[in-house]
Image: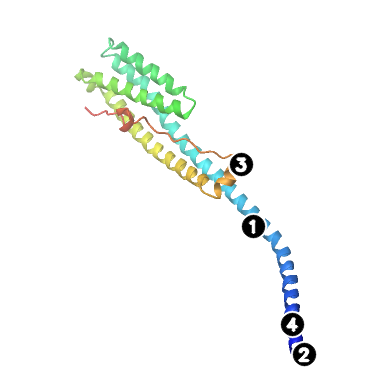
Amino acid sequence: MSNLGSFVFIVILGIFIGTFLGKIAWSINIPVVVFLLVIWVISMYNSFISMTNRAKEAWSDIEVQLKRRYDLIPNLVSTVKGYAAHESTAFEKVTQARAAAMGAKTMGDHTKSEVLLSGAVSGIFGIAEAYPDLKANTNFIGLQNELSDTENKIQAARRFYNGNVRDFNTTIQSFPNNVIAGIFKFTQQEFFELDQDQAAAKEPVSVKF
């Protein structure tokens, strides 16, 4: 066989061997690729579940503080009534707002009702301005301090919850996470945001006199 023929034979043999080995390698890699893909999907799914649970836990912290405020409000109304029983409209307003807040089901309902309740409670404290004896009442002072502390905790818990929701929403919106989120029906969660058109939504209820 001539040198040229030997060279051509070696080239053809090399191509044949390379193709054969490539097919073997590819057949071996397919299960590996599928396995790694499954592991990645499971990892992302578990990550979504973990982030969802963190948001739920954060919302539970908000509910604890909201319940504490709901429990304090009747005592506040009762105390103020002892000095300003004729302010029935303000008392009815805060009672109705409290009932609406306690019955809220959706995030939108919570947002609206909490804004109204904050405004109603502010009105009760406003009434106290005209009654120096009420402002000096030990029970009243204790209630205003407890409500102020609760309001601050609600704001802190709300920020923590919204931070968790933001992280979750950003994660499931990013590619390729959004593909996995869509397959398993993960959807964006709602923020607990107060109405920016309401002064009560921007700051905790003022209880300083």
Mark 3 touches mark 2? (CB < 8 Å): no
Q: Give, as a three-letter code, the residue at label 2.
A: Ser
Q: Secondary structure at mark 2?
A: loop
41 to the left or right of 209: right
Q: Nearer the viewer, residue 34 or 56?
A: 34
Find disc 1 in the rendering and name its residue.
Answer: 36
Q: Give, as a three-letter code, the residue at label 4.
A: Val
Q: Earlier in the sequence, mark 1 or mark 2?
A: 2
Q: Earlier in the sequence, mark 4 or mark 1?
A: 4
Give the number of the mark in front: 3 or 4. Answer: 4
Find disc 3 in the rendering and name its residue.
Answer: 184
Q: Earlier in the sequence, mark 1 or mark 3?
A: 1
Please provide percent x and percent y for residue 42.
62, 50
Q: Earlier in the sequence, mark 4 or mark 2?
A: 2
Q: Is residue 115 above or below residue 173?
A: above
- Rounded to the nearest angstrom, the CA distance separating label 4 from label 2 is 10 Å
Q: Give, as a three-letter code, the residue at label 1.
A: Leu
Please provide percent x and percent y for residue 81.
30, 14
Q: Secondary structure at mark 4?
A: helix
Number of numbered discs:
4
Mark 1 touches mark 3? (CB < 8 Å): no
Q: Earlier in the sequence, mark 3 or mark 4?
A: 4
Give the number of the mark in front: 1 or 2. Answer: 2
- Scheme of colours in the image: rainbow
Residue positioned 41% across, 41% down in the render:
160
Find disc 2 in the rendering and name its residue.
Answer: 2
